[in-house]
Image (cartoon, rainbow, N blue to C red):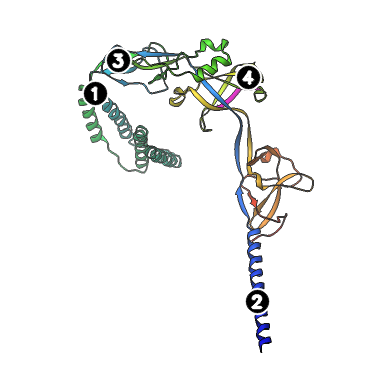
Amino acid sequence: MKSRDRLLNVLAAAAAVIIVVYFAAELYGLASHAYSTQTAYSQTVMETVDAEMFVIRDETILTTDSSGVTVQLAENGERVSRGSSIAAVFANETSAKNYIEAESLRSKLGVYKSINSQLKLANIDMDKLVKEIDAEYLNFVDAAYDNDFSELEESKLVFSEKMSRRQISLGKTVDCTEKISSLASNISSLESAATASSVITAESSGYYVGSPDGYEDIITPENLDSLTPDMLSKALETEKKAIPENSIGKIINGYNWYVATVIDTGKATGISKGKTVKLVLGNSDDNTVKTTVYSTEVVGDNKTLIVFKCNMMNDELASLRKIDGKVVISEFTGLKINRDAVRFDEDGGAGVYIRRANIVNFRSINIIYSDEKYVVAAPDEDVKLSHAHLELYDEVIISGKDLSDGMVIG
């Protein structure tokens, strides 16, 4: 009897081991055949060199002898002509606030007048208008999220105008007469209590900037032809100068401004005078500008001093001075793929496995750029390979074991 009990215990233990092994094998099989994919999209990748940059502009600081509260009449980065009004001085804060409020209401008045003038809209592209409304709504939400109240107000007006156009195009009546009358009355009252004691005009044409930064005369365009790495290094290390207390901004004279930097000569290959080169001004690729190489000079041991010329201008660019940026050496446009997905066939050709329905297929790729995280494959029209080539929107398998061309997966 005891011997029978022992036999049953042994059999039970063996069964338990078999069950554990079976489930472990199943789990291993599931884990080893988990296939994750990534859609192949066309993207442009930039090969860049990090660079410390200094912005050089021909700038004139503006001052006024008038006392009171100064209000900017021109926007940062706005192109102004000689003699145009750029700022106004008011006797007190109340008068200045009245002027600012009147200007804000004047913008609203313009929108309502525009809406009221659109009595009938014919042949309107409704699909385009709806897309514009959606885009403006997103701008409105982004401005609210960023607490950008000036942008929020402007976006709200544009959104309202486009929505009114949609309403009118659908045959609905939009009457802004009462609103226009009310705004005009309010503006008139505010203007009567907002008389400027003086108005400052631009002495030369250029771009207006509301706040000097104290680096205006550290390096000027007049120094470009005699610029040295030491001068640039000192400019990058120099503390800004004191700004005159009666300053009301500055004018960036002319259309062109410059960016100077020093990079390794080996990285500067192909950068020559007159060539178009892109710069990333800051940490985001969104701040990319197109420039022309003004000058290059090999200096010291394996270093090249480069000056770039640019004529783009906006609020953000007008305020740049010292920048941790990037010089774009080259650009590659193609299908961006996770490096882990790349396989090699028996002939050494590069490719990836893709998933179509439940079938695995091998697709050749022609790698034109790679780093430690991803590769860029030449677009379809640029490849002539032995296997079928990877195409836009293919689902590339980036993880999974024992893959083979034509296999069926769950």
Quote the CA–CA distance across marks 1 and 4: 52 Å
Mark toward the viewer: 2 or 3: 2
Task: Name the mark on residue 304.
Answer: 4
Q: Earlier in the sequence, mark 2 or mark 3?
A: 2
Give the SS element for disc 3.
Answer: strand
Mark toward the viewer: 2 or 1: 2
Amino acid on which disc 1 is placed: Glu
Say whether residue 375 is left or right of residue 231.
Answer: right
Q: Position of residue 152 (x, y in %)?
A: 36, 35
Amino acid on which disc 3 is placed: Val
Label 3, residues with CA under 10 Å away: few <14, some 14-19, many ≥20: some
Quote the CA–CA distance across marks 3 and 4: 47 Å
Please identify the quarter of the rendering in which residue 390 is found.
top right
**Farthest residue toward the right?**
347
Per the image, the residue denoted by label 1 is 93
Give the SS element for disc 2.
Answer: helix
Quote the CA–CA distance across marks 2 and 1: 90 Å
Amino acid on which disc 2 is placed: Ala
Amino acid on which disc 4 is placed: Thr
Per the image, the residue denoted by label 3 is 199
Mark toward the viewer: 3 or 4: 4
Q: Are marks 3 and 4 in contact (CB under 8 Å)?
A: no
Quote the CA–CA distance across marks 2 and 3: 98 Å
Q: Earlier in the sequence, mark 3 or mark 4?
A: 3
Q: Earlier in the sequence, mark 2 or mark 4?
A: 2
- Quadrant the N terminus occupies: bottom right
Please identify the quarter of the rendering in which residue 189 is found.
top left
- What range of the chain is rendered magenta? 270-280
Is 275 contained in the magenta span? Answer: yes
Give 339 or 88, whichever is nearer the viewer. Answer: 339
Label 4, residues with CA under 10 Å away: few <14, some 14-19, many ≥20: many
